[in-house]
Image (spheres, coloured by chain):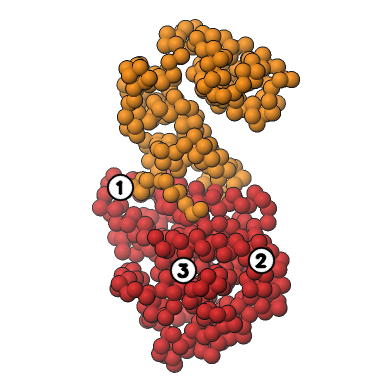
Amino acid sequence: MMGNNAVAQTGAEVSRPRIWAIGGGKGGVGKSFISSSMGQALAKAGKRVVVVDLDLGGANLHTSLGIRGTEFTLSDYLNGKVTDINRVAGVTDIDRLRLISGASDTLNIANIKYFQKAKLLRNLAHLDTDYVILDLGAGTSFNTLDFFIHADHGLVSVTPDPGSVENTYRFLKCVFIRQLRAVPEQTREMIQQVLMHRRKGGRKAGSLADFLEDITRQKPSVAASIRQELDTLKLHIIVNQVMEPEDTELGRSIQMVCSRYFGTKIGYLGFLHHDRMVLKSLQQRRPFLSTFPQSRLAIHIDTLVASLMAQDDD
Amino acid sequence: MTDFPDMPKGRFVVDVAQQDYYQVLRLSPAASKLDVINAYRRAKLAFRADSLAVYSLYGKDDLEKIRKQIDQAYAVLSDHEQRQVYDVKRGFVAPRCDNDGKIEAETVQDDVTDIGAADGSAGDNVVDLRTKQHLRCDPDPELERRIKAADAYPGDFLREVRESRGVSLRDIAAFTRISIGYLQAIEAEDAACLPAVAYLKGYLAQYAAEIGLEPHRVVQGYPPLAD
């Protein structure tokens, strides 16, 4: 609940930044690339942006942005060396874009304590900026899930690779379970079993959507609170590294399947083409978007960012 | 670009027991004919056997069941008359008057037996609304039986059905804007005059709808389209 409270408390402030989190179950699906590129696109559109490297223990967002590091890192803030979160956000070569880097994080950063996580979640809203972008690590650890749920928009990067799609569903299941922390223990347990495909008493395990329908009949009040919790999540799918024309349908398919299986709406933001120049620009330590601003990929990223910004405005 | 903007907010879960066809295709009851076609295409793509998007969530049997649901939903929603019947039955629209201002109601369990079977309410008093006046209301039972049993819909059979329903080719051409030449070619199965397959399927479906046949079954059973 803590994440929700933080949002509620600061929601009254006019200058609260919008928070976008980029996650996804699998590594190598382009989370850091999308984070840094979206950050640059927002900066290009005249917004002030802070990108935060929350791939705890595997931070390399600075490399995507073509810099070595910043004066302070996330560790300095979490350890209390720097008290103002705004001081940790270091400037980059790009106007209006700042970075909270994990470049020289301490080696135990992957296991941050609960109070450190709480402090960070609470204070992200105090960053003096228009947008905050959280670049999350792979996997489904509580830390990653909590940052993802805390954001105003949760973006999931998927590549047209079975492993990635599989992990995306796993990630979404974990997100839903985590989001339902406040739901009575017994019900959560049941949902967990549904999502894990366990069969109980010979009854076929259905989808989450079927389960919600069942529970609506039995305990309408519980069902209502579950729906309310799930409805507060704003999830979006980005299909990344598209090579074949038929892969462009994957996002819509995943959206349709999610709608049917989870019974909850998930947005489809669009797809990004695979581009060899991404690797090339990384090797040259230059940010892709400003190096190839006229490429198809860069234009698609601008479009994605514009459509997500439009959703925030209404 | 992002999601289903026209999906009503309150509809959250799949109502399997009641088989809401709109819900199956993720559509709002206000969806246009084109929306239905697009949604159907997307749904079939998403739930096809080798779809990347489903294999870790659904088993083979589940997928088959889902595809059947999708087909059924499409069969009803893509057919103008069946959809109207369905909408009235589910309370999506109020019964409408036809051009003369009088409601011509009759039970249509024959037309929609598969709807009835799907939700187990075959005995309901379903009201059909004939908006097309040119369809005759006293069908020949022998012909109806043959239509129901038919797997193939050759051109001469289509003509027989059309004539028994008292519909002229001119009417169909006026209604659908398909040229009478193509309509004649369809009934004659005249390969030389038929349009390209993609167009033919569309024309055939429209033609079938005009004479009160199920468009998808006619398209499937039309001999020149069989491989």
Could you tell me which residue is drawn at 42 percent across and 81 percent down?
Answer: A128
Q: In the image, is residue B40 above or below residue A209?
A: above
Cα–Cα span, label 2 and label 3: 25 Å
Which quarter of the rendered picture does the N terminus of chain A lie within? bottom left
Q: In percent of the image, x 44 and y 74: which residue is there?
A: A130
Q: Is residue B103 visible?
A: no
Chain letter, disc 3 residue = A
**Disc 2 element:** loop
Q: Give the colour chain B carries in the figure.
A: orange
Which residue carries the number 1 mark?
A216
Q: Label 1 marks which chain's residue?
A: A
Q: Is residue B201 left or right of residue B121?
A: right
Q: Earlier in the sequence, mark 2 or mark 1?
A: 1
Residue B68 at what x, y percent from top left?
51, 34
Q: Which mark is residue A294?
A: 2
Sequence-first disc among 3 and 1: 3
Please give the name of the residue rendered at 65% of the width and 49% of the height, measured from the top-left corner: A246
- Looking at the image, can residue A273 be seen? yes
Q: How many marks?
A: 3
Instruction: Residue type at mark 1: give it.
Output: Thr
State the image quarter where residue A186 is shown: bottom left
Residue A20 numbered mark, or none:
3
Kindly indicate whether the residue at mark 1 contacts the one at mark 2 (C-beta within 8 angstroms): no
CA separation, marks 2 and 1? 51 Å
Q: Which chain is red?
A: A
User: Which residue is found at the position 55% from the left and 87% from the top?
Assistant: A70
